[in-house]
Image (cartoon, rainbow, N blue to C red):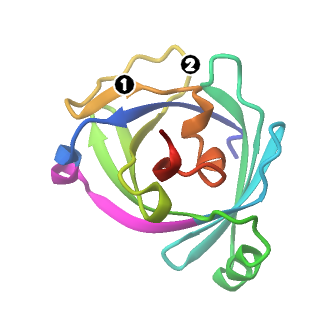
Amino acid sequence: MKLQEIERKFLVKNAGFKESAVAKYEIAQGYLSTDPQRSVQVRIKGDTGFITVKGIVSEEGTTRFEWEKEIPLSEAEALMELCLPGAIHKIRYLIPHGKHTWEVDEFLELNKGLLLAEIELDSASEAFDKPEWIGEEVTGQKRYYNSQLSKEPYSQWE
């Protein structure tokens, strides 16, 4: 089990990524805790539930502890009822590019209009190819963390 997440996050310039997507699915995500030192989230992806614990992000914003466990859908639905206000709803697209698979989240509801792409890496210094639809890097910018978007949605930004 991998207990360290290494990822970079970028804004998406346009919807061109959809043409290359090999899969897409809806995600509902709520938070039992959004403490800056650790967050605990419940996620429903299709008909599967997950519980995830994430630790504090490194100074560069690329690395943190992550533990995730698949749980029955009924348990995830019950835990969603206990979550803090501000559940995140999004469509996730998987797009292979080079030797990586990019995940693009098209946010819905109060975060509608926000498109974020993430790439998971084996090391913080790993090189990767950027597709043409990738925009500004926002790695480490807290306002783009899902836990922050649940408290301060994109539609409320100035």
Q: Nearer the viewer, residue 52 or 84?
A: 84
| Most distant residue in the top direction | 125
Q: Which mark lies nearer to you, 2 or 1?
A: 1
Q: Nearer the viewer, residue 82 or 63?
A: 82
Label placed on residue 124: 2
Dot 2 or dot 1: first in sequence order is 2
Query: In this picture, which residue range is highlighted in magenta?
Result: 18-28
Where residue 128 appears, as percent x and y from the top left, is 36, 22
Q: Which residue is painted at 43% across and 68% down in the image?
A: 26
Magenta span has 108? no
Label placed on residue 136: 1
Q: Amino acid at mark 2?
A: Ala
Rendered position, 87 above or below 59? below
Rendered position, 84 above or below 106? below
Magenta span has 22? yes
Q: Which residue is painted at 52% across and 13% down in the image?
A: 125
Where residue 74 appears, as percent x and y from the top left, is 69, 86
Where residue 82 appears, as percent x and y from the top left, is 80, 74
Label placed on residue 27: none
Circle 1 — which element?
strand
90 relative position to 40: left or right = left
Q: Amino acid at mark 1?
A: Glu
104 relative position to 53: left or right = left
Circle 2 — which element?
loop
The reply to whether residue 150 is in sight is yes
Q: Quadrant of residue 83?
A: bottom right
Q: Which residue is painted at 48% across and 75% down in the image?
A: 46
Estimate how packed mark 2 is, as few (under 14), some (14 to 19) or many (20 or more) residues with alpha carbons within 10 Å. Answer: some
